[in-house]
């Protein structure tokens, strides 16, 4: 099985800890009790011990160690190991970039000698200078795109003309390069300063998928809310917010890290709701790359079938969505789990409640992706042992969000609601992977429930048609079926 890419690992840590905070490890001489390599290591070790619960990445700056010579480089390697012992990936802030052979040596130094997980890099010598750093997909590369320092505008904001005659700031051309490198290698991000939120918005338009490292919040005066709104993706990820002195100089480093993590999450929840709503309004045209990939995989593994099928509702359909198949594809199941999290960001609940049986693997994937506990109502009462109707650990009065694979007419959901209610659990919100748009949403709304879906069926049909995976005739047939099943308003 292929090893996880850097960004898959980073996403996993960010989701499990519910944080986008990146702690900078910058042992300035003025902050060290002992201005030696040992003093720099001790400074970082304390910071790591005090903050690892609340961050998803550490960013040591190579310069503050290299200034001590060989012993400083050794101290840097030891600091990287300390971070990784806490289960936190390390982004080495070194801004490397050179011709191929030199870049290969930089890659060896960063990834094999220092054992860093990612590195910042200067892309201005082009793709061939970046390829040695990008070659190993388990490592990440963040290319300098629009930096946070005042002098960034001297070069990065200059207007350039591409081969087609289009004019744009240099930072947009760099962002397009990062997007292309990420599509090709799968492990390229960008460095975009939080001090330039308008430029960040423009960059996100041309590079919607790469992760952004956004320095500048804190001592440089970057606006946290504006940065999160501009950079975070609809899946709630895609952004690292590094803070160095704001935490290292705090009286209580742990409290400050938690405060920052929580403040970022408040802004993240707002931004995700806005972006998800925007995506739903415009259909598949505004889907993120990860959402497109998920739609592609559902088709590729055979979750979509055409023919004559009797649905659970009793309706006869020309198309069938089989969401039991993903259990055979762990990476697909994990991607499905991740796709639910943005929809749940603003909901109130203490646990997930997966409806048997198709939704139970999906519920487990969501539970693992978000580190959220789960219960499930049994189809039939247990006649032995505990004789439980609901499996899991819960208390009466708790509110749960119901997880299911899809919704057609919505009738089948109420049996599960009743079982949960019999155990004293409250249900307000239902989240599904696919809304077949056959009246289920209307029925739930009429009954006082809210429905959220990762995909609308018509959007999926339009997307698969645009990719050549369905014919126009198939889409027309499916669409006619959908229209025939929508309840007539009374």
Image (cartoon, rainbow, N blue to C red):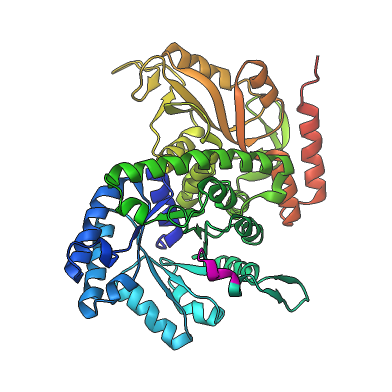
In the image shown, does 345 or 386 lie closer to the viewer? Answer: 345
Give the left or right position of residue 171, taking residue 262 as reference.
Answer: right
From this view, report whether residue 255 is shown above or below residue 189: above
> Whole-percent x and y of residue 373?
38, 32
Split into 4 quadrants, where in the image is the N terminus? bottom left
Give the left or right position of residue 16, taking residue 217 as reference.
Answer: left
> Whole-percent x and y of residue 448?
61, 16
Give the left or right position of residue 62, taking residue 85 as reference.
Answer: right
Give the left or right position of residue 481, taking residue 14 as reference.
Answer: right
> Whole-percent x and y of residue 482?
76, 33
Q: Is residue 149 magenta?
A: yes
From this view, report whether residue 163 is shown above or below residue 20: below
Report whether residue 324 is seen. no
From this view, report whether residue 233 is shown above or below residue 368: below
Split into 4 quadrants, where in the image is the C terminus? top right
> Whole-percent x and y of residue 89?
35, 58
Q: Is residue 445 magenta?
A: no
Report whether residue 356 is seen. yes
**Range shown magenta:** 148-153
Prevailing secondary structure class for the magenta stretch in the rendered image? helix
In the image shown, does 319 or 144 lie closer to the viewer? Answer: 144
The residue under the point 54% across, 40% down is 342
The residue under the point 77% across, 76% down is 164
């Amino acid at each position: 099985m292929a090893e996880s890419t850097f960004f898959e690992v980073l996403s996993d840590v960010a989701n499990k800890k519910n944080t986008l905070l990146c702690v900078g490890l910058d042992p300035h001489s003025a902050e060290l009790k002992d201005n030696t390599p040992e003093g720099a290591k001790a400074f970082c070790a304390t910071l790591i011990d005090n903050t690892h619960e609340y961050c998803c990445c550490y960013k040591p700056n190579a310069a503050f160690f290299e200034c001590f010579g060989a012993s400083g480089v050794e101290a840097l390697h030891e600091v990287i190991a300390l971070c990784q012992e806490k289960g936190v990936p390390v982004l080495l802030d070194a801004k490397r970039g050179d011709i191929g052979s030199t870049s290969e040596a930089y890659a060896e130094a960063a990834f094999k000698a220092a054992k860093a997980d990612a590195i910042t890099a200067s892309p201005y010598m082009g793709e061939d200078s970046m390829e040695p750093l990008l070659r190993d997909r388990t490592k990440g590369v963040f290319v300098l795109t629009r930096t946070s320092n005042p002098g960034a505008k001297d070069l990065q904001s200059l207007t350039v003309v591409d081969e087609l005659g289009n004019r744009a700031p240099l930072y947009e051309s760099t962002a397009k390069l990062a997007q292309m490198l990420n599509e090709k290698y799968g492990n390229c991000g960008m460095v975009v300063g939080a001090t330039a939120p308008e430029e960040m918005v423009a960059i996100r338009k041309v590079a919607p998928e790469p992760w952004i490292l956004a320095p500048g919040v804190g001592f440089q005066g970057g606006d946290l809310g504006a940065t999160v709104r501009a950079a975070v993706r609809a899946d709630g990820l895609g952004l690292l917010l590094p803070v160095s002195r704001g935490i290292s100089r705090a009286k209580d480093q742990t409290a400050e890290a938690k405060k920052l993590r929580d403040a970022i999450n408040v802004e993240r929840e707002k931004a995700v709701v806005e972006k998800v709503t925007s995506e739903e309004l415009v259909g598949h045209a505004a889907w993120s790359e990860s959402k497109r990939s998920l739609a592609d995989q559902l088709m590729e593994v055979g979750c979509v079938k055409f023919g004559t099928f009797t649905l659970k509702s009793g309706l006869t359909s020309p198309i069938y969505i089989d969401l039991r198949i993903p259990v055979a594809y762990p990476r697909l199941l994990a991607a499905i789990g991740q796709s639910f999290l943005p929809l749940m960001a603003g909901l109130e609940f203490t646990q997930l409640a997966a409806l048997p049986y198709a939704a139970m693997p999906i519920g487990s994937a969501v539970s693992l992706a978000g580190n959220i506990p789960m219960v499930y109502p049994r189809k039939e009462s247990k006649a032995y042992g505990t004789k439980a109707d609901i499996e899991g650990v819960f208390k009466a009065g708790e509110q749960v969000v119901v997880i299911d694979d899809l919704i057609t007419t919505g009738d089948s959901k109420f049996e599960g609601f009743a079982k949960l209610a019999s155990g004293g659990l409250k249900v307000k919100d239902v989240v599904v992977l696919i809304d077949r748009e056959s009246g289920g949403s209307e029925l739930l709304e009429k009954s006082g429930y809210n429905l959220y879906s990762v995909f609308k069926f018509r959007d999926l049909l339009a997307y698969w048609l645009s990719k050549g995976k369905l014919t126009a005739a198939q889409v027309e047939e499916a669409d006619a079926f959908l229209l025939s099943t929508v309840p007539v308003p009374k």
